[in-house]
Amino acid sequence: MEIPEQVAKNVISGADGQSVVMQLARKVTLPSMSYRQPVLSVLPDAYWVNGDTGLKKTTKAGWDDAVITAEPLAALVVIPDDFLMDATVPLWAELQPLMSKAMGRAIDQAALWGINKPASWSESVYQHAVAAGNTVELGAGGAGKADLGYDVAQVGLKLAEDGFQLNGFATEPGFKWRLAAQRNADGSPIYTNLVAENRNDLYGLPFVESTNGAWDQTVHAIGGDWSNAIVGIRSDMVLTLHRDAVITDDSGNVVFNAMQMDSTIGRFVMRVGFVVANPATYQNTTTTRSPFAVLVDPGSAS
């Protein structure tokens, strides 16, 4: 009789709070590995009817599919049994938030910047914005004048010109303090409410600072209509524990035997997909538009 290898199972829903993308993007639960999200690609028109006997004209609308494919994101953690028994803290419980942050970091790296992204995922938020020309360089106020508020407003303008409504920002670590350091002509703080009221908003819109190490240091903020960044969750992060498993390398060679080496292997895994939708707008009916724009260091966008 075969003894099941799985000896413990806990569902963990912690990646949301560790990932900028998971906090801002639209999340859908995937009923299967792949999910098709209809995206408006052709906009209808309306026509005036001339006179009592005028004929009404026809119009049409069209939709394309944005395909979200759930890909596994996983890691194995090995802990010797002696270490587990002698530990004064519950090690697996301590590891759960750390792995949640690690997975949130991997999601942000792939979805925001395209780093190690699965082939089935769309291009990243940053790549999408840059390809559409939606970049604003820090110091765009000109005349050597530092005006962060002006620069951020230009990000919103880029989106408006493409027909999208800005509804939030993903920002660099410490962006709140960059804002708090802004001064008016009299030397008085401009954004005093950020510290006094413990708020993270700019022009009445929320911003989420990256704290998981995934952020590109040449980028200061990404503004967007985040309803067009779609994260598909097929399964949340799950931990299973294994005492009789082996770990192999890419060539199939056994590199670790949990039973032989008196250890427990924790397997953390979730399945997640991502796509940037780019619906047609009346302001820009071509594919040169993007629902995202980025605030970057001068000369860094590529």
Image (cartoon, grey):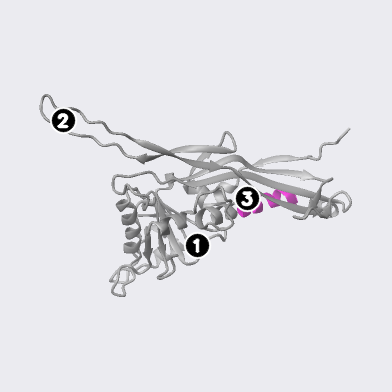
Q: Can you identify the residue that label 1 sits on?
A: 173
Residue at screen point 86% across, 35% down: 2
Q: Can you identify the residue that label 2 sits on?
A: 49
Could you tell me the amino acid type at mark 1? Pro
What are the residue bounds of the magenta stretch?
89-102
Badge 3 vs badge 1, beta-carbon distance below 8 Å: no
Question: Which percent across, then down, holds residue 249?
Answer: 77, 55
Could you tell me the amino acid type at mark 2? Val
Question: Which percent across, then down, holds residue 246?
Answer: 82, 49
Q: CA distance from mark 3 to mark 1?
A: 19 Å
Label 3 vs 1, first from the N-terminus: 3
> Is 92 colored magenta in this rendering?
yes
Q: CA distance from mark 2 to mark 1?
A: 56 Å
Could you tell me the amino acid type at mark 3? Ser
**Element under disc 1:** loop
The circle drawn on residue 109 is none
Q: Residue furthest top?
A: 53
- Can residue 193 be seen here? The reply is yes
The circle drawn on residue 100 is 3
Name the image quarter holding the N terminus. top right
Residue at screen point 73% across, 47% down: 267
**Element under disc 2:** loop
